[in-house]
Image (cartoon, grey):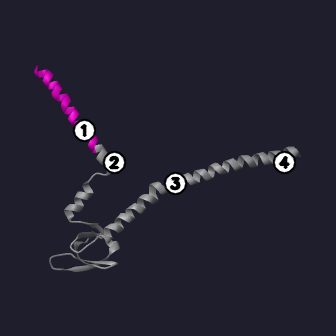
């Protein structure tokens, strides 16, 4: 009879240790989600809000719907843009603004490599001169 009671308390202790590791795994998963998904999204939202708040008259922009034009008037919530030489004016919510800058500037910004790609591009650039140096050294030995 005492053996049964002892076995029950021993198994309870083992499940308590398992419970701690389960809680640690859940906390770890939440931390991973935060750093991989939530935090980067909050940064993007903050950058977009700063971009929308820094608008001024005369800026060129593209809306999220693809309308391109020059800013004519700005209020707290809306932006009026002029879309063509015919002075067609359209009012949008600030949240509908996708990118700021001329079409050339926007295209250049999209073609810029990401930070990781920049490092890879720099490594490739550093490798190319090394290859040409080896070729020129072999050419020198061939010429002699």
Query: Can you give x and y, in whole percent of width and height, for residue 11 in the image?
Result: 75, 46
Q: Is residue 34 visible?
A: yes
Front position in the image: 60 or 62: 60
Q: Give the distance between the C-alpha atoms of the residues marked 1 and 2, in whole angstroms.
A: 16 Å
**Residue under pointer 2:** 116
Judge whether residue 108 is colored magenta: no
**Residue under pointer 3:** 31
Q: Give the distance between the C-alpha atoms of the residues marked 1 and 3, in whole angstroms.
A: 37 Å
Magenta stretch: dominant SS? helix
Query: Can you give x and y, in whole percent of width and height, for residue 7 in the image?
Result: 80, 45
Query: Can you give x and y, in whole percent of width and height, for residue 122 in the image?
Result: 27, 43
Q: Residue at x 32, y 78 (%)?
A: 78
Q: Nearer the viewer, mark 2 or mark 4?
A: 2
Bounds of the magenta segment: 121-144
Mark positioned earlier in the residue sequence (1 or 3): 3
Q: Residue at x 58, y 50 (%)?
A: 25
Q: Is residue 132 above or below residue 107?
A: above
Determine which of the numbered discs, if any, sits on residue 117 in the image.
none
């Amino acid at each position: 009879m005492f053996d049964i009671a002892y076995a029950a308390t021993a198994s309870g202790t083992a499940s308590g240790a398992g419970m701690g590791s389960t809680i640690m795994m859940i906390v770890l998963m939440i931390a991973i989600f935060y750093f991989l998904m939530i935090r980067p999204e909050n940064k993007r939202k903050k950058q977009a809000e700063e971009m929308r708040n820094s608008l001024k008259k005369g800026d060129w922009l593209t809306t999220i719907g693809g309308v391109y034009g020059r800013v004519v008037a700005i209020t707290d919530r809306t932006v009026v843009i002029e879309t063509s030489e015919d002075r067609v004016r359209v009012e949008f919510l600030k949240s509908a603004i996708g990118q700021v800058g001329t079409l050339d500037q926007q295209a250049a910004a999209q073609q810029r490599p990401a930070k990781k790609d920049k490092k890879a591009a720099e490594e490739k650039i550093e490798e190319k001169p090394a290859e040409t140096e080896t070729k020129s050294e072999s050419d020198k030995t061939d010429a002699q």
